[in-house]
Image (cartoon, rainbow, N blue to C red):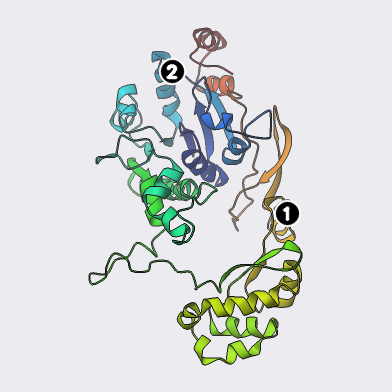
Amino acid sequence: MKVIDLSAYIAGPYGCTLLADMGADVVKIEPPSGDTLRQYPSTLEAEGRAFLGVNRSKRGMTLDLKSPDGISILKRLLRDTDVLVHNFRPSVPPRLGIDYDALRAIKPDLIYCALTGYGDTGPLAGKAGYDQVLQSITGICSLQGDGKSGPEIVYGSVVDFYAASLLSNAVCAALFHRERTGKGQALGVSLLGAALAMQATRFVWADNEGRDVGRDMRSGGVTGIHPCAAGTNIYVSANTPHFWKALCERIGDPAMAANPDYETVRKRAARADEIVTRLRAALRKHTALEWEAIFGEEVPCGAVRAIEDMFDFPQVLEQGYVAHLSHPRVGGYRALSGAFQFGDGENPAPFGAPAQGQHTDAILSESGYTPDEIAAFRRSGTVAG
C-alpha cells in the first residue's frame, strides 16, 4: 500500500507512521517551508527531536500545493496511491482543489482520511485543533488536577497520539472494506473524538445523576505514586483483594489487610489519608528499586524512571523496541522501532525520518517526470530540497 501524508505536527504524521510500521510505503509531502514540527524547540541542532520521533520509516518530498504545478504533481502521484491523509481545516481542501470529490474523480478507490480538530461540520469545524486545547475543553485537564491544585495538562501529546491510533485503525478498516467491495471512501478522525474516546470510562452520565457525580477511577490515593528512600518514587497498584493483602504483607503491616474497614477499594478510598500515611512510612525504608525486588510479582508496581532508562531497559530490548536509525543531518540515533509484532514473516525494517525534501527527485522520477521537468519545478519553487 502507498500512502501520501500531507499532514503536519503529530497526530496525522504519527498515524501514517503506524501504517509504515505495518509495511506501507509512506510519502511525506511538506510545503517548501517544511513541517512546523521541525522548528519546535529541540536540543538536537540539526533536526527537531519530535519530528524524528513521529516520522520514522517515511520517504520525504516538498511540494507547494498553493501553485498549479504543485496540485498537478499531487494529482499525478495519486495514480498509484492507495491512501491520502491530511490535517487541513475543512475549508482548505476545496479551496486547493484536493477535496475528496475532486480526488476520487482521479482515483475512484482512494481512501481519503481527513484529520481535523473538531470534525468537518458544526460551529467549531473551522477552528484549528491542538492537543492541549482539546484537553482543556473536554475535561481532561480538570480531572487531572483532581480539584486540589487546579487543572493540569497531561504532557506528552496524549490526544494526538490516541488520534493517530484511531487514524491508522480507520484506514486499515477502510482498506479492508475496499478489498471486499472495490470501493474507496472518505474518513473523518478528529482530536475532539479522540479526547472523548480516551475518556470512555468518564463519559457516562446516568439519567438520575447530578452534574457533580464522581467520574474518575482513582483508588483514593492508595494506588498511585509514593516516595521512597533516597529521593526515589514508586507507583503501586493494589485494587484486588489479593494484591491488597500482598502489599500489606510485603511492607510489614499485615494488620491493614485484616482490618474490615479496609477490605474493599471503596472503603480504602474513604480512609485513604490514614492508609497512605502508614504506607508511605513503610516505603521510606527502601529505595524504589529495592521495593520492586521486594514486591516481585505479588504487587503491581514500577519504580519511576526517566525515558533515558528505556534505551537499555532489558524488557524493552528483549521486545525489540529500540532501533538504531540514521538521518542525513543528525547522523545515527536510537529510536522506537515500532510497536507491532507480526507472527507471520518479519516486521518491516524501520528507517530514519526523512530530511526535508530528501526523496523529492526519486519520487517525482517514479511518477514519470524527467530530469528537465524536475529542474524546472525547482527553479519555480514548486519543489525544494
Amino acid carrying mark 2 in the image: Gly
User: Which of the 4 image quarters holds residue 371?
Assistant: top right
Question: Residue at the spot x=33%, y=69% of the render?
Answer: 213
- Residue wearing tag 2: 70
Q: Relative to 60, say whether 175 is above or below.
A: below
Looking at the rendered structure, the secondary structure element under dot 1 is helix
Question: Residue at the spot x=57%, y=37% of the render?
Answer: 55
Question: Residue at the spot x=72%, y=63% of the render?
Answer: 232
Between 242 and 41, the one lying in front of the other is 41
- Residue wearing tag 1: 309
Q: Position of residue 59 (x, y in %)?
A: 58, 31
Q: Position of residue 125 (x, y in %)?
A: 29, 38
Q: Is residue 174 visible?
A: no
Side of 103 where 64 appears, left or right: right
Side of 256 where 205 appears, left or right: left
Question: Residue at the spot x=61%, y=30% of the render?
Answer: 354
Between 80 and 16, the one lying in front of the other is 16
For the residues labelled 1 and 2, the Cα–Cα distance comes to: 44 Å
